Amino acid sequence: MATRKKKRKHSAKASIQMHELSKAGTSIELEIHAANKKVGQLVIGRGSLTWFGNHWKHGRRFSWSAFADFMDR
């Protein structure tokens, strides 16, 4: 009996701006999609990461230590 392929529910597209790893302004931008609709954008930088929800003008910024505390909860 043939098995059916599962449809993907989530996907991500990456845009990397990296001149040197130690320079300010280097970042990785990920667009997150669920069911072919954009859920948000995650910008990962040297000092912090920022989440932009769909249709948000301003992101929610987390320092790496604040993000680690959040993930440890």
Image (spheres, rainbow, N blue to C red):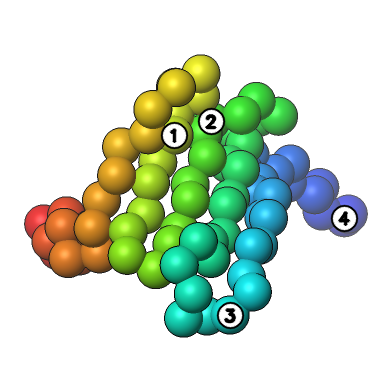
Crowd band around label 2 with a 10 angstrom C-alpha radius: few (<14), some (14–19), many (20+): some
Q: Amino acid at mark 4?
A: Met
Task: Find numbered disc 2 in the image and state the secondary structure of the residue it sits on.
Answer: strand
Residue 64 percent across, percent down from the top left: 25, 64
| Separation (CA) of disc 1 from disc 4 | 44 Å
Outermost residue toward the right in this view: 2
Q: Which residue is mark 2?
A: 39
- Residue 55, placed above or below residue 18: above
Task: Name the foreground residue: 72 vs 62.
Answer: 62
Crowd band around label 4 with a 10 angstrom C-alpha radius: few (<14), some (14–19), many (20+): few
| Residue 7 located left or right of residue 9 | right
Outermost residue toward the front in this view: 24
Task: Find numbered disc 3 in the image and state the secondary structure of the residue it sits on.
Answer: loop
Outermost residue toward the top in this view: 55
Q: Which residue is mark 3?
A: 20
Q: Is residue 57 visible?
A: yes
